Image (spheres, rainbow, N blue to C red):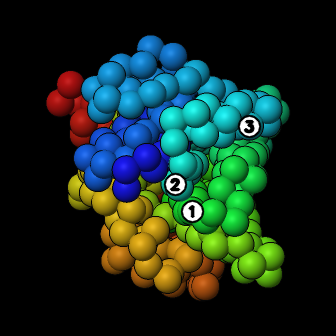
Amino acid sequence: MHGEVAVVTGGGRGIGLAFARRLASAGRRVLVTDIDESAARTAAEEIGGAWVRQDVREVDGHRAVAERAAELGSLRIWVNNAGVLIAGESWRHDPSEIARSFDVNVGGVIAGSHAAVTAMSTAGGSILNVASTAGLAPVPGLAIYAATKAAVLSFTTSLQGDLDHAGLPIRARALCPDVTATDMVHDVATDPGASILFAGSRPAQADDVARAGLELLESRQVVRAFPRSSGAVARGTGLLPTLGLRLSASARRTGARRQRDHAGRD
C-alpha cells in the first residue's frame, strides 16, 4: 500500500471521516475534501493526511482533486461520500433545494467518478459511491433524497458495465447504509418530514458503515446494503411498493412518536 492514495469527499465529518480514518489506518495516504475547509483541515491533521476545500458541484474541482492526489502518490481509491438531505413533502421544497440535492448527491458522484476513472485509467483502482437504503424502497418524507440515491445506484451499476466494456481494471461499487448516527441525521431530528428516519430502534455507527464499504471494495458485489437485514427489507418493499407504502406509513407514525417523546424529554 506504500504510496497508494485515497480520496474521500465530504471527509470532514460523519461517514466520510470514518472512511478517512480507516483508510489511513490501513496505510494509505488520504486526501480529505469537504466544503467546510476547517473540517477538512482538522480531519487531515488527525489522520496525518492532506486536505483541500471542495464543492462537489463544481466539475473542474474534481479534476483538481485528482491532480492533487497524483502529487501525493498513486490514486487507487476514490470515495464519493459528500451528500445533503432535505425532508418533507417533495412539492413543498424550494426548487433551489431540489437542484442542490441533485447537484451534490448525483452530479457530485458522477463528476467524482469520472475524475477517478480518468486518473486511474489502466493502472486500476476502486470507486465507492455512498448511496442509501432510501434508494431501494419507498421513503415518504424523503422523496427527493431517495430519488438522488436511486440515481446513484443506477449510475454505479451502469458505470461498472462501461468499465468492463472498456477493459479498465477499475471497480465501481455502491454502498447503501441505513440510517446512521451523523450530523446530517441529527440536524433533522425535530423535522416532522424526517420522522421515518427515527422509526428504527438504533442507528448504525459511522465506523461500521465505513468498514462495510471498504469490505465491499474487496468483493465481487457491486451493491451492498448495510446492515444486510435492512437491505433485505428495503429491497422487498421496493419490489412490492404497495406493501412498502403501508409499512412506511406505519414507520412514519412510529418515528413521529419517538420524535415527540425525545422532544418531551428535552
Residue at image point 53% right, 28% down: 34
Q: Mark 2 points at which residue?
A: 77
State if disc 3 and disc 1 touch (CB < 8 Å): no
Residue 15 vertical placement versus 226 (above, below): above
Residue at image point 36% right, 76% down: 228
Q: In the rendering, at what x and y percent does residue 67 appear?
A: 67, 35
Left or right: 139 in relation to 252: right
Q: Which of 44 and 148 is in front in this view?
A: 44
Q: Name the residue under label 1.
A: 125
Residue count near mark 3 (Cα–Cα under 10 Å), binned few <14, some 14–19, many ≥20: some
Q: Mark 3 points at which residue?
A: 63
Residue count near mark 1 (Cα–Cα under 10 Å), binned few <14, some 14–19, many ≥20: many
Identified by mark 1, the residue type is: Gly
Residue 30 vertical placement versus 205 (above, below): above
Q: In the rendering, at what x and y percent does residue 213 appear?
A: 41, 62
State if disc 1 and disc 2 touch (CB < 8 Å): yes
Identified by mark 2, the residue type is: Ile
Assign a secondary structure to mark 1. strand
Left or right: 263 in relation to 49: left
Which quadrant holds the C terminus? top left
